[in-house]
Image (cartoon, helix red, strand yellow):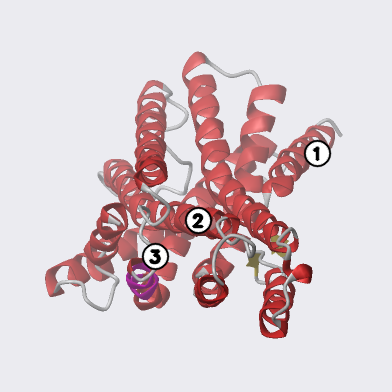
Amino acid sequence: MEYLKYCQTYIRGCGLASNSSPFRKILAIYFFLPPCFLIIAFSVYELWDANNNDIFLVIEVLECISSYTQLTIRKYMIFTQNELMVEIINDCDQLWSFDTCGPELGKKFKQRMKNCWIMVKALVTCGFTTFILMCISARADRDNLLPFLCWIPDFPYATEVLFLSQFMLLMELLYYVMATDGFYLLVCMDIHIQFEMMQEMLKTIQFDVISEKESWEKLTELAKHHNRMLHQKLNQVFSKYYVVQYFMTVAAMTVQTYTLKYRMVNIQTALKSIMYTFSLMFQSAYYLFPASNIEIEAENFSTEIYFLNWQDHEDVKIRKHILFMLMKSQENLELMGEGMVHINRNEYLLMFRLAFTIATLLDGLNQL
């Protein structure tokens, strides 16, 4: 679980956790937080003050609000749920070791966790490249002086201060991605692996081959381990974030789709939009596919229980226990965003369709 320990270090390093150092808390609250709120406020003011008939200006301002809202919700999540996140990391240490089902499978499971961490780093690298392109595009375009469009106060060096603030906060967002997205992906993979190991243990229960005592011990251990699954705690941490992430991603993808499909853009803006869209697609897949994989493995575990030859066993206690396990395993194991958004791979395609539909409607409104 070394990678989850890395996430715990990032969570503490954010400065918003209860166990963060006083210096980091001062930086997070008094140095990084005010500029974030200020840029969002300037974006809202620009939207209020601007000519709303200019659809291009509106979508660029909404892109700014979307991006910095994602940073804000991550800050809120760590500030309110950091203790529960650390508790989940500690609970993961109490789950089965990856070598429980043998060294060969253990090596395979450890490699999966390593791949998850590599994917998080890939997302951060992709995000960093996108932000650099956005900054280059802003410096090359005389009309857009900032990476994200917002209102610029009329005082000396205001543009430079806002440019530096936006870049600084974008780099901070990458740090929060390591803390929150990495945590989520690793915990989901751990739960996924635990269900696979439970299926492997079920396959070793053969009532005609092993003793009744050994069968009973394995069944009770499986029942206890199934109750230790952490999906409910994970859902509690990310429930509000799911909703914000879903709608902000749809809004941001709508902006990029509209920009690429219906607007004449230069090469810098096109590259920025493509990289930004790719980052959003990658990030959305991080949240939707792992949650969906947990549901699938939970269903597979229930199926494995069903195919045990429990009905032929003479011991009524074992038969009742297996029926109880079968009933328990069929409970819905789904992650939800405040009860409104079902986090699974089906929503991935719906997000693209919704974004494309809204972009098409915006083009129709712009032509009126």
On residue 197, which mark appears?
A: 2
Query: What crowding class fits label 2: few (fewer than 14 Cα within 10 Å), some (14-19), or many (20 or more)?
Result: many
Query: Which is nearer the eye, 342 or 212?
Result: 212
Give the prevailing secondary structure in the magenta stretch.
Answer: helix
Residue sitting at the far top? 267
Type of amino acid under label 3 = Lys
Q: Which residues are magenta?
A: 86-91
Q: Position of residue 198 (x, y in %)?
A: 54, 60
Q: Which residue is mark 1?
A: 357
Tell whether label 2 touches label 3 (CB within 8 Å): no
Query: Quarter-wise, where is residue 37 in the image?
Result: bottom left
Amino acid of disc 1: Thr
Q: Which residue is mark 3?
A: 75
Q: Is residue 249 left or right of residue 109?
A: right
Spatial CA span between label 3 and label 2: 35 Å
For residue 76, side relative to residue 206 (left or right): left
Whether residue 267 is situated above or below residue 78 in the rendered picture: above
Compared to 188, does 284 lie above or below?
above
Q: Is residue 164 left or right of residue 289?
A: left
